[in-house]
Image (cartoon, rainbow, N blue to C red):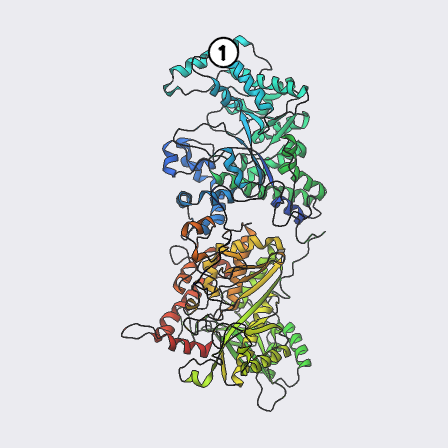
Amino acid sequence: MEYRRSTAGSSHHRSLSLPRSLNLPKSSETTGYGSNTKPLFTVASSLSELEHIIDNCPIIDHHAHPILKKAGFRTFESVGLNLLQTLSEANSDSLKDVPNTLVFHRALRILQKNFSWRTPEGIHDWDGWKRFRDHVDELLFTNECFHGLQTILLDDGLRYESTLKTHDIRWHDQFLKSPPKRIMRLETVAEELMLPGMPFEAWSSKFFAEIKSAIYNRDIAGFKSVIGYRSGLEIAPLVLSYAAKNGYEKTQEKARTTPGGKFRIIDEALNTYIITSFATEMAKAIEFGGRGKPLQFHTGLGDSDLKLKNVNPVLLQKFIDAYPTVPIVILHAGYPYTREAGYLASVYQNVYLDFGLVFPMVSQEGQESVVRQVLELTPSSKAMWSTDGNNFAERYFLATHQMREVLKKVMGEIHTKESVYTKDLSSMVTDILFNTANKLYGLGLELRIPPPLLKQKEPVAPIVEEKIIAPSSAESLKWLEKFLANHKGIEYLRLNWLDYSGILRARVVKLRHAINQLEENEDGSILGVTKATLYLLANCYMSEGGTAVGEFRLVPDMSSIRLHPHKRDGETRGKHASVMCYIQDESHEPIGICPRGILRRSLKRASEVGLSDFKMGFEIEFCMFKQTELDEGNLVPISASHTWSTSRALQNKALVILEDIDKRLSEVGIEIEQFHSEAAKGQYEIILSPLPPMMAADSLIHAREVIQWVCAKYGYRASVIPKPFDGECGSAGHMHMSFKPVDKQWSFFAGVLDKIRAVNALTLGGEMSFERVIAGYWAGGLWGCWGRQNREAPLRLVEEKKAHWEVKCMDGMANIYLAMAGVITAGTKGVAWNRQIYGEATVDPSTLSEQERTKRGITTPMLKSMDEGIDALFKADGTTPTDFSETMGQGFAEHFAAVKTAERDGLYAQFNDPATGELDVLRRRVWAAQWY
């Protein structure tokens, strides 16, 4: 149903508050999409459930750094900070080779897949990514990059040039389920307390006081040392005071003689004094009943400022022996000394192993090797993961994305070997991502993982459709025999296919001939049609690419067979049966541009990512025009005293016609749920019951055929043209859909939003469609977005618990197979890439300012013309199909563009005045009403 918005007033709903808070639920609330009462899910019994846990377990990111406040990349680069450092520890000139690494190629591909939807021109290279980042909304981008993080423990001890500022720790809270906490970097504190001319004793006293205070500060979760960068990890258990004092005085002299007073502590004795002083105080606190806060050590991988041999974690052994009660965390898997780090974590009760930073700094193969080596010895109760995110939010995003991918690969391999129970693997996963850090840092958070919608012991093949392979002749004959047994007197078989203009094509074949062909042709085909068949327009104008040479074969799908509504006067039984066909070539497979074949393949891909039980239902909106008037060039509706859902609109012949339509549909097994008058003159709506996708599409086409035949019997033409009258609502073809698992609805429709302009090209039939799609008429709106019961959004969430959505940006001129395939293809990509939903609209988005829309992630305008629709199917060069188009089918984009261009130039151009170029709107509508 469509409605026009009143201009007299409008209601305003609560909008998403972004500037300081994204209104995310905190730790007392559930993670995922359900309510707080949903059961927890932490133990898997199958591989699919194990992968569900890996994908959905919230992460305690126990080691990371604050995000820099937004600035142009020229500002960053002017002080030596390069975005490529997101992917490498290289500096200065060494960075030029980063784009030649596996790490770079993989990261850019991930960023392109997940963020290209934000910009009309797409992201084609690293410069394109930088341009995108320079203009992206900081809050929305950070929110997406932090997805899946329960909380972050932030080391805020990194130093920057004065022109750069980091967000404070509290700023990060708005993107997290639980408030972040601080990790205190010991060396930074020591340096900040070292004032010019301050004696060693005064400095030492202040440092001890700062440590003691921090040990009991609830907002400080732990401590960190970068002594590996300074003097190495071979730390003496004790240091003499005079040696530390001597190192302190050298450092003071260095600071005094350095321009700007910049310095860092590099003296070995002083560094050792700092670390052992902390360890001594922490050990005392633990001895007197305090909770031991961990001390993190940077080990392994780092920039050229460190000496790799000095950061081997095995060098910590003497220090570990000296302080057996102080919890010690070996950061970064000690890479490349991962086995040494795992050994320490396995033999010392106070040593824990983190394997962050290698994500995204190491190739996928290297990451997999690191995870395997960590698990060789390290108990899961001693293993943790962190992003080590810093500076730029994409570091968090890439690390999390890659970690889940690799963890699924490694755990899947172990599962396949059947050497470990699945329930134990799931416990290891939740330990690594949540439990170990939660206990070690004393966070007291509750692990909540939403259960999978379909919990099952063994994997079950998803039910997408009764049949997703082209039928053979033997199979077709069985279906036909069964049908004929229940329908006597059939003499003709109508072979139907829907062309790219949305016009139903048909060949009427004698039944005997059809049976003979099926008996002779093993491929299931009945007859051949010219290869130009999908290139021809309604006026027989052939679009570019069509040829009169060669033929395709029509292959009926007998599961779609139904009685055709045609009956001669006096006949009680129809003689015609109707069936939908695939268009097949000599390979015995539907051709790449066959609409039915494209839908079939999209369903197969959906099943491969775990989607099942699709149900589709359609609203058929149409107007009844007097046929005699239509033949004279006039649009005269059956009812003028008419508006939405009124009894008055049924007090005429329309009610008899609608009842007759219902009767004919019921006779062929197509059930309707209701009918009613719509808002435009002579306009009515029939709502079909939901069915599996292919059956739903076939039933929709047959239902329209029945509607048109019944109306014709009464002297009326039923038409689905999008905009029959100016100033009144148009006729749409809204599609309702649902599927399982329900929790995938968000990533599915995020995928649809990612490709909304390309999808829109398929769900709207042609140039006339854009007369209907205007703001304020409940026609799906002008902006790519979704809304809960929002009829001005192209995607309306009807019922979340059932994943029931309505696609409103669709009309009856579209090829329904292509439209459905477009939605499913885009949605499947969203599920495959685990996209996150965005762009919720609580009001008509056209009433919002650009700034308000941007805050909601509503940045993609819907199409304004079919020319824009064609452009959406190709990359920026205008000739290379997008990934979406290539997934739809080989040659699909080129063919679609050829047909729609031909419609514009060879069909609709006839309605323009040759002298003025002015469009004769009425004449075009009358013409279209005869065809649609």
Task: Provide residue 37's location: percent of width, then percent of height.
Answer: 67, 48
Looking at the image, can residue 588 be seen?
yes
- Residue furthest to the left in view is 915
Task: Provide residue 932's location: percent of width, then percent of height.
Answer: 47, 75
Comparing 138 with 43, the one in front is 138
Residue under label 1: 200
Q: How many marks?
A: 1
Comparing 553 with 668, the one in front is 668
Residue 338 in the figure: left or right of residue 892? right
- What crowding class fits label 1: few (fewer than 14 Cα within 10 Å), some (14-19), or many (20 or more)? some
Task: Provide residue 77's location: percent of width, then percent of height.
Answer: 38, 34
Point 64% across, 66% down: residue: 466
Q: What is the secondary structure assignment of the residue under circle 1? A: helix
Q: Is residue 747 above or below residue 253?
A: below
Q: Is residue 133 above or below residue 594?
A: above
- Tell me which corner region of the image, top left, top right, bottom left or bottom right, holds residue 166: top left
- Residue furthest to the front in view is 8
Point 66% across, 78% down: residue: 483
Q: Amino acid at mark 1?
A: Phe
Comparing 709 with 472, the one in front is 709
Task: Provide residue 231's location: percent of width, then percent of height.
Answer: 51, 19
Q: Is residue 113 above or below residue 434?
A: below
Residue 379 in the figure: left or right of residue 222? right
